[in-house]
Amino acid sequence: MIKEIKAQDLNTEKFITKKVNEIRAAVGSGMAINALSGGVDSSVVTMLGHRALGNRLRTVFIQNGLMREGEPKRVTELFRKLGVNVEIIDAHREFLEALKGISDPEQKREAITQTFYKKVFGRIVLESDAKCLLQGTILTDVDETVAGIKRQHNVFAQLGIDPMKAFGYHIIEPLIQLRKDGVRIAGKELGLPEEVFNRIPFPGPALAARIIGEVTEEKLDMVRKATEIVEKLLADSGAFQYMAILHDDRVTGMRGGKRDFGHQIEVRCWDSLDAREAKPTRLSFEVLEELAASILDEVEGVVSVTYNIATKPPSTIEAV
Amino acid sequence: MIKEIKAQDLNTEKFITKKVNEIRAAVGSGMAINALSGGVDSSVVTMLGHRALGNRLRTVFIQNGLMREGEPKRVTELFRKLGVNVEIIDAHREFLEALKGISDPEQKREAITQTFYKKVFGRIVLESDAKCLLQGTILTDVDETVAGIKRQHNVFAQLGIDPMKAFGYHIIEPLIQLRKDGVRIAGKELGLPEEVFNRIPFPGPALAARIIGEVTEEKLDMVRKATEIVEKLLADSGAFQYMAILHDDRVTGMRGGKRDFGHQIEVRCWDSLDAREAKPTRLSFEVLEELAASILDEVEGVVSVTYNIATKPPSTIEAV
């Protein structure tokens, strides 16, 4: 039974000191490793690990080719400014290969998870000198794993390995007593900038979750460009979350006076407190028309743009 | 060379008298036949033919199963009130059979056209005693056929038959010198009610043009229901045209607390003068939310609703 620390009860300085000491004790004079995604949980773990171990923590950022425009550079630059060296592992070919021919949403997620854990990160961990692995598991992940909503975040369980028995590996999960709000407080104290907390939620399978049907490099380029436009134009919307979705259906359009079957981008922008229920944001038509014009102008192959007007439920936040 | 009669130059009474006399002269003491769709052109031809021939005109309404809710009944009732008997030919099985397995928009249109002309109406004409066929061809149809935009409306050309040579059939096209505005004026003079002119444009392939991908009875039921809701809620919008489109893509939704891959309906509502250029109508969010709620509530299997925000061009008015 994990003992929860509620955000309002969190003594941040004391918590950080305790976790830094625990990490030092567990790692001893060896090396530790962690994967940074740029999300708040893995960012906070990176800062704690760095404070505890300095250069004895190897932090990798796995470029899966499914990310937003400029993401690897953005994340590594951000951590470089904080004195943390992050190693980019380019594995986008492996992910694209794994996604080939798959249209089913569940199978897409599975292909990405398996490629991450079994192939790419699994290989890095096994080839490394690290005896400890730092993970950003939070209490909500544990709850959701128990409830069967989310998959287990434990890398070795994914690999089918009991790390202690097999290798004497330790898994360290310094955030496991916290929820998201507690993690944010700790992150602020550790010097992480606003942009780490303020970015809108982004799904684990990244842009692969924003493509209906098979994921290809061409489609990733289209949805990446559309995502950049949507995130830029809706940054000041005050919305809970916003996104661009590339449809698989083709619709009729006209280019240069000729019929042209093209792609459709769906824009979603949600008002929500906690993602359990959500309503479409009442954007002005000036903004909606600017979104459509920019996407039609800048994303080659797109002839149609829609705005989602359904509520959650019965819709979900993401389409895939 | 067909001599155009512009709406402003139309002497309506004189035009009608002339066409009635021409039809009488051509048909002599025999029978004539025509197909009524409920659109303005075929409605005006029906009234002209009825005035000229009375019961010697056989008017058929071909139920292709692709129509809006209540359409055959609505059209036949309307003409019954005008003293015109319209015979409904139920051919929906033949059309559904012809559409089976076809996803390509062009092939769908072709299947509907071929079924109409070669199978259903062709059969009725050949089996009838009629020596004359009345057609609602207008000058714009001729122009568009010459330009290659639209297909030729001449039934016998469709059948690959020169009617004069083969059967001594006449084709009578009383509206061929007019454009739409002139046809409307003639229709009003002939006693056709407002609703014949005021209905928003509806495509030839009917609801088959509102389904992306294969047309099935189940999908027709869904899009028919959604069309009814959209046409009811947007009747007072003042828009040029509005429609519901059923997508082929499945999106994630939730029903009864469980994940459920469902359908998406796209609503389009256009502001336009002449359909050449169009902008999405700036509907209020009250209306958009009511549209979404009604569709999600009343159309089984739908978990998501969008509103089109693209302009024409590069979009087209219809999606298929």
Image: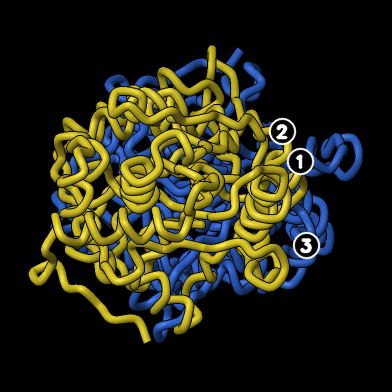
Chain colours: A blue, B yellow
**Callouts 2 and 1 in the same chain:** yes
Residue B39, horizontal then vertical, whole percent: 36, 46
Q: Residue at x 85, y 34 (%)?
A: A162
Q: Position of residue B197 (x, y in %)?
A: 23, 45
**Towards the viewer: B314 or A42:** B314
Q: Disc 1 or disc 3, which is closer to the eye? A: 1
Residue hosting label 3 = A100
Residue drawn at 52 percent across, 23 percent down: B254
Q: Nearer the viewer, residue A87 or B69?
A: B69
Q: Amino acid at mark 2?
A: Arg
Q: Residue furthest right?
A: A166
**Given this view, does label 3 or label 2 mark the residue nearer the observer?**
2
Is residue A268 among what the camera can see?
Answer: no
- Residue A251 shows up from this direction: yes
In this image, B219 relative to A319: left or right? right
Discs 2, 1 touching: Cβ within 8 Å: yes
Give me the disc on residue B97. Answer: 1
* Mark 1: secondary structure: helix
Q: Residue furthest left?
A: B8
Specify whether disc 3 shares its chain with disc 2: no
Say which residue label 2 marks: B93
- For disc 1, the chain is B
**How far apart in space, not on screen, are marks 2 and 1 (Cα)?**
6 Å
- Would residue B301 be found to the left or right of residue A311 on screen? right
In the picture, the quarter occupied by the N terminus of chain A is top right
What type is the residue that disc 1 sits on? Glu
